[in-house]
Image: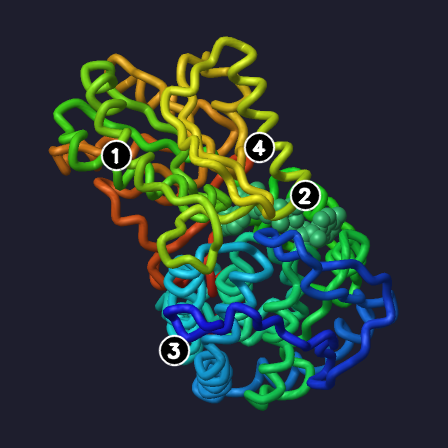
Amino acid sequence: MTSTTGADRDYVPDVRTLTIDNRQVQPEGAAWDVYNPATEQVLATVAGASSKQVDDAVSAARKAFGRWSSMSGHERAAAIHRFADVLEARTDKLLASIVNEVGTPVSLAEGLQVKLGLMHLRWQAEAAKKDRTLHLGGYDQPVPTMSDVTHYPVGVVAAITGYNYPLNLAIFKFGAALAAGCTVVLLPSPRTPLTTLLFGDLSREADLPDGVFNVLVGDAEVGQQLTSHPGVDKVSFTGSDAVGAKIMEQAATNLNGVTLELGGKSASIVLPGTDVESLATETHLRWSRNGAQGCAALARLLVHESLYDRFLEASAEGFEQMRVGDPWDPKTNIGPMIRPDHRERVQGFIDEALGAGGKALLSVDRPLPESGWYVNPVLLGNLPHDARAVQQEIFGPVAVIVPFSDTDEAIRLANDTAYGLAANVWSPDLEEGRRVAERLRAGTVWINGGGAMRPDAPFGGSGRSGVGRELGEWGIHEYLEPRHIQWRV
Ligand code: NAD
């Protein structure tokens, strides 16, 4: 059966081999089952890399580094574009793989993963061509000199991704690293390894030079070996803050730098004067997309007290439009949670909040499909600001609403979590929106919606949301070191 996109809903990638030094390699480590979270069926049994295979992948990347880094930016760009061409020709397969292993609604998988991911990869290919030399000019102390700053690639990159967007999270890392002249060993989440295994296979078709792009799969132990490996020069990780802290420690074994793209508890601030009737539906459809299994889900709604009742009334329509269920149904916007333990965790947040006096102000109460790890969305209110549901990333379809009395309080509440990833400000006055944006601890602030991740703008956060930035020039610089060259005149 095919979907409206042309992708085959029964498709499961048949690649079970690792990609090491441009070869298909049978994995020799422990095996596990990969599930379709919408049907609860086993999609595939996948074996992980052995310790020796981790060594082999790092050595292949190290061996390839000299040649790849000394190629011209234009040559690297051509190779990355070839890879993008091969991926683009397999759009339907990538799409089906993502929908089946993650449970991402098909329209979202198509737009936010495949199309967006490939657009970013093309941008990164072009960025490989850029001359980043800075001419600093003359300096007289202690003798007259001139200086340039050039850049050199950091080396072998260990790139580890979370489960929720396997395609674009990987591209954000390997596209930038390859463009910068680094070589890569990529390790996806063991819960969603199939799309990434397919990448490895397709990279061979794109004829990337041997060893430049290696793909392993495996559990946390494989991740630990890779991130503390003496042959690795840089670790780039997307995942939870708890694992991010371990990654930092592991990378410290070799004093390696890290880029950490972690979780968030992003606020959507509704300032006085906002036309809540026209924005409420968009607000709810946005925070809940992919079942709010997105790092920048704006699931903390801060609403001015003068608008609170009207906002809630206007929100009913947004909840009515939420469709929970089969990710292949084009009308679905909330698919399943990735695993039953994650569903229990999300339900735990709801139960705890309701048990402590919180209220379910809005919810979807339609019956859930019989199979699949689904949770119906809910908007929780009447919670103190230190409640767990207000402070912690839930990563499921649960939002909280908190009233505020003036703009200073809104900013204080917005900044009052351990995270600092993203925020949205709703205001009829753009200047006021900008003034508020400038006071938010967030790596991205959208004003009046939009929500785009531009290839040329940075993405990332501070606090428990991470270290460093992906995308744009900032993302390329995560994989470059500056080199000061000074000569006497
Ligand atoms: P996770 O932290 O559970 O796992 C991420 C990866 O880490 C997996 O591949 C896992 O195998 C690996 N891992 C676990 N222990 C390890 C160790 N000790 N050493 C090396 N690797 C190890 O995250 P997840 O549940 O897959 O993803 C969800 C999280 O990712 C959420 O917190 C979400 O906010 C975050 N996320 C952030 C961004 C961003 O750009 N900021 C984007 C997407 C997701």
| Of labels 1 and 4, the one closer to you | 1
Horizontal and vertical percent for residue 390? Answer: 48, 23
Mark 1 highlights which residue?
317
| Of labels 4 and 3, the one closer to you | 4
* Image point (58%, 89%), residue name: 205
Mark 1 or mark 4: name the one nearer the start of the chain. Answer: 1
Q: Tag 4's secondary structure?
A: helix
Packing grade of label 2 (10 A; few <14, some 14-19, many >=20) is some
Q: Is mark 2 within 8 Å of ligand 1?
A: yes
User: Residue type at mark 1?
Assistant: Glu
Mark 2 highlights which residue?
243
User: Residue type at mark 3?
Assistant: Glu
378 relative position to 341: left or right: left
Horizontal and vertical percent for residue 335? Answer: 49, 49
Alpha carbon separation for disc pair 4 and 3: 41 Å
Q: Toward the viewer: 203 or 64?
A: 203
Q: Tag 1's secondary structure?
A: helix
Q: Tag 2's secondary structure?
A: helix
User: Residue type at mark 2?
Assistant: Val
Mark 2 or mark 3: name the one nearer the start of the chain. Answer: 3
| Of labels 2 and 1, the one closer to you | 1
Q: Quadrant of residue 101?
A: bottom right
| Of labels 3 and 1, the one closer to you | 1
Alpha carbon separation for disc pair 1 and 4: 23 Å
Q: Toward the viewer: 303 or 103?
A: 103
Q: Residue furthest top?
A: 357
Mark 2 or mark 1: name the one nearer the start of the chain. Answer: 2
Alpha carbon separation for disc pair 3 and 1: 43 Å
Question: Are dots 2 and 3 in contact, CB under 8 Å?
Answer: no
Residue 159 is at least partly visible in this image: yes
User: Residue type at mark 4?
Assistant: Val
